Image: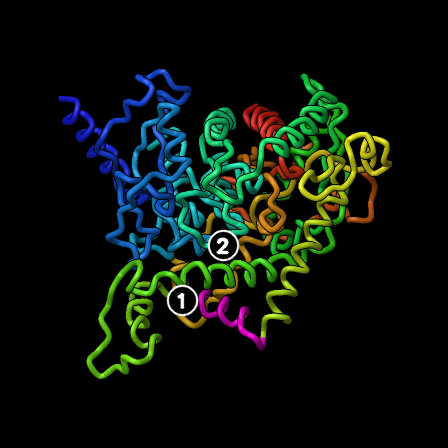
Amino acid sequence: MLRRFVSNAADSLREKDAPFNAFVSFENSLNLTNNGKGPLNEYSIGIKDNICTSGLPTTCASAMLQDFRSPFDATVVKLLKKAGAQISGKTNCDEFGMGSLNIHSLHGPVINPFRVDSRRAAGGSSGGSSAAVAAGLCDAALGTDTGGSIRLPASYCGVVGLKPSYGLVSRYGVVSYADSLDTVGVLAQDVERVEKVFECINKRDCNDPTSVDERLREKANLLATKSIQRWSGESLKGLRIGIPQEYFPSELTSSSYHILASIRHLLSQLRSLGASIVPVSLPSTAYALSAYYVIASAEGSSCLSRYDGIQYGLRVPPSHESNFTSTSRTYSPSRSQGFGREVRKRILLGTYALSADAFDNYFLQAQRVRKMVRDDFDDVFSIPNVLYSKLSFEEKDANDHGEDGVDILIHPSAIRTAPRLDDVLDVSCDRDTLQDYVQDVLTVPASLSGLPAMSVPMQPGTASSSSPSFASSQSSDTDAGLNQPRDNQQSDENWPIGVSIVGQWGTDELVLKVGRVIERLSRR
């Protein structure tokens, strides 16, 4: 009887998911761990299809792995089960996590649940996880974020999406795209659920060599707690919020007036509660997107080299006319048919960046830019980066920078609202495909630096908002670098908008607390 009940639940979920295509497989077994006493006992959770599960296929939305079943659960899945969560199924994604619109999938694109008849993108690469949460198909979902793959779909679908600090959550059992960037995160309808799931998976894992030890976790948590204690309560007096002027590019200011209006309205509310709004500059931001695609593609080229049709993945036998003395001709048919167009494109770019002729000019240069981006963040935060800082807590407290720096940064999660699928699926030569990559321009800097970042839905602002007018980046504390836009695009005004909160490494608790404040303000 219990098995029939679970099977009926899976069939019901499959039927509800039909308009969205958020799930690619459904769990037919019941988790009886902890006898129903775990902190996530009543939670149903979707798992992105690039995170290994022993009971369900792990396809990474690719023909290369369409028949693959992992013999083990990823560490994060084990922790969820141990906490009593019920796994709902595997969620759709861009192939191997490569994409920002969830249109590069073996299983087809994900439809944004906010208004299904408009057929808009859910964002990517964790679009299935975001859509499943937004449609109410599960209480929370796990995603992975390489350059914005949690925050961007969270913004498009109007849900909360957290990318934790790199190294806090285990990547053991996560199919790699870019090892130095991939981070497992959480999506849910509200900050409380995100925090509850995050607490269960925020554990040291000896199986993951990038998992940070307890000493650094405790040190960073202590610094975050000290910052929270300065302003904890109804008043935000003592909280310093930085507004990076480089995060309002021309793509945003020229066509998305409603996003800027919402940001202005939010900053006005935060200031009314006592928070200080401080304009800051992160000058290396302009180079971050280019550096990200070089690094991510290079690491992706290396990580995906294992799929050769011999050790892993789809096997396509070479033709009889092939030269079998050539290794490349033996496995090239498998890789050509197993990988989609976007994955092949990034593998080619990454392979070139790692070649002897291009290594110094591309890959090493991108790594230098990455350090510049990280240094920019360290320069504006009042909290030191415990991974790299040589100062003790006492020395940092005595340092003038601690008083001048900010506690967190706030900026729009995306340069626009969810695009129409018909537009982004257009394969004609007239479409500017470069715009697909520009979507990540506001999210990649935090990923390159390994910082915690969370997208929270914003209350739509209006032209008549009582918030102050932001004229230029050269003005006083009140303008914080927001430029007045020229056009008002009314067609997108009612679609979800997200605001991102970025903190210093390890201050995830601080980011979550500020997220709860913004969430409360948006619901007024």
Q: Which residue is mark 2?
A: 178
Mark found first going from the N terminus, 1 or 2: 2
Position in image of residue 498 (x %, y %): 55, 39
Q: Position of residue 140 (x, y in %)?
A: 41, 31
The answer to whether the residues at label 1 and label 2 have Cβ atoms under 8 Å apart is: no
Q: Is residue 168 left or right of residue 75?
A: right
Residue density around tag 2, few if under 14, some if 14–19, many if 20 or more, within 10 Å? many
Give the Cα separation between the discs numbered 1 and 2. 15 Å
Within-10-Å neighbours for mark 1: few <14, some 14–19, many 20+? some
Q: Looking at numbered disc 2 in the image, what kind of residue is underneath it?
A: Ala
Disc 2 is placed on an element classified as loop
Identify the mark at residue 35; answer none if there is no mark.
none
Say whether residue 356 is magenta.
Answer: yes
- Helix, strand or loop status at disc 1: helix
Q: Could you tell me residue 257's position as x and y percent?
A: 61, 47
Give the numbered dot on residue 344. Answer: 1
Magenta region, residue range: 343-357
Q: Residue at x 25, y 27 (%)?
A: 30
